[in-house]
Image (tube, grey):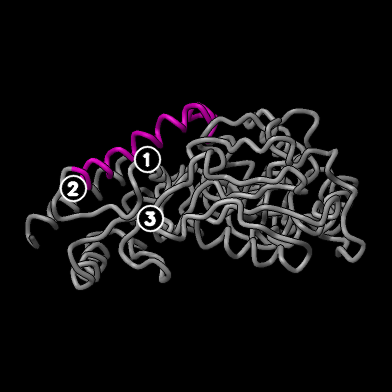
Amino acid sequence: MSSTDRIHNFSSGPSMLPLSVLEEAAAEMTNYQGSGMSVMEMSHRSQVYIDIFNETKANLKRMLKVPDTHEIIFMQGGATLQFSAVPLNIIGRTKKASYAVTGNFSDLAMKEAKKYGEITVACSSEDKNHSYIPQQSDIKIEGDESYFYYCANNTIYGTEWKYVPMTKDVPLVCDMSSNILTVPLDISKFGIIFAGAQKNMAPAGMAVVIIDKSLAGKELPFTPKLLSYQVMIDSDSMHNTPPCYTIYMLGLVLKWLEKQGGVEGMEKIKIEKAKILYDVIDESEFYRGCAETASRSDMNITFRTPSEELDAKFVKETVKAGFDNLKGHRVAGGLRASIYNAMPTDGVVALAAFMRDFEQTNR
């Protein structure tokens, strides 16, 4: 396999993985480091797999600078299952929670949470089709909520929180599925961070949960055992068979990320990549960005041409040119380029060149 065999994949998720990671996984597919079997075939209780698990967890803890007050959990079901797990585990203290509704997934999370307690909208960007992120002064919190919830990056609308909300003494819960490992964090500010694996970490099927251990063990009495954070902490994510291969792939991605300079190095790269595409949009009278400038995502660049017909033509021609997955989400329409950590800069440069050529021939 070589880079010449692969297209420029701008999928919003499941997204592309680093080529070197895929090659390493392919080389170990049938015989992992002399074990005579694939990681897919191993018992999760075997020492060879326990070593993979422990190294991956330790590397993630080090890379994200997770303090000892917090625990890392690997859970099945992806991020969407956490829409239920979060309220089931921590809404019980006051039976209240506040949600920032700044896109499709935070709205879905809020609706799910309403099954378990009294939910209020702390702030919303719905009035402008989720094209912006509310300011700190827009956030309304009473102070007696069990938690405040927000989604750090909105893949569909292309907006991203550029600050961590201040929530008084209310625990902060963040869905960081699409920008985890792209920006340094002070984990101690958060009660819970969770992220689906399939954008910046590994193949789909797993969520990483980072939880302040003081919040665990207070779940509602009807919480399913496998959704209990305390059960997962006590069993080190192995109450049942974990998503073994996805954890292994995360381990390979973390080693690749280390070579890019870690989270700090990746932050610089992702800012540079986003600027390449936003410069094309900002310098053009043909393209129009969908998100307000101050709230634009570095992960998901959303934009439009002058018409839906040209949007469709753009998508069709990108496929012919060796690009894919540039059609916007069905909820928002338009166009979208997702440039997660594994998207190389040369892919972004190539798309920028295509965009300029397309503008010249279609304006």
* Horizontal arrangement in the rendering, residue 83 relative to residue 330 (left or right): right
> Do the CB atoms of the residues marked 3 and 1 lie less than 8 Å apart?
no
Q: Earlier in the sequence, mark 2 or mark 3?
A: 3
The numbered dot on residue 353 is: 2
Residue 213 sits in quarter = top right
Q: Which of marks 3 and 1 is nearer the N terminus?
A: 3
Does residue 5 show up? Answer: no
Q: Do the residues labelled 1 and 2 touch (CB within 8 Å)?
A: no
Q: Disc 3 designates what residue? A: 10
SS type, badge 2: helix
- For the residues labelled 3 and 1, the Cα–Cα distance comes to 23 Å
- Give the residue type at disc 1: Ala
Q: Cα distance, mark 2 to mark 3? A: 15 Å
What secondary structure is marked by label 3?
A: loop
Q: In this view, does 214 lie to the left or right of 265?
A: right
Secondary structure under tag 1 reads helix
Quarter holding the C terminus is: bottom left
At 61% from the left edge and 46% from the top edge, which residue is drawn?
Answer: 140
| Residue type pointed to by label 3 | Phe
Kindly identify the amino acid type of the residue bearing the numbered disc 2. Ala
Q: How crowded is mark 1: few (under 14 residues within 10 Å), some or many (20 or more)?
A: few
Q: Main secondary structure of the magenta part?
A: helix
Q: Where is residue 335 in the image (x, y as percent from the top left)?
A: 31, 61
| Magenta stretch holds residue 180 | no
| x, y percent for residue 270 | 40, 37
Stretch in magenta: 257-282
- 3D distance between C-alphas at marks 1 and 2: 25 Å
Dot placed on the residue nearer the N-terminal end, 1 or 2: 1
Q: How crowded is mark 2: few (under 14 residues within 10 Å), some or many (20 or more)?
A: some
In the rendered image, residue 156, in percent from the top left (x then y), is placed at 44, 59
Query: Which residue is label 1 attached to?
Result: 294
Residue appearing at x 35%, y 51% in the figure: 291
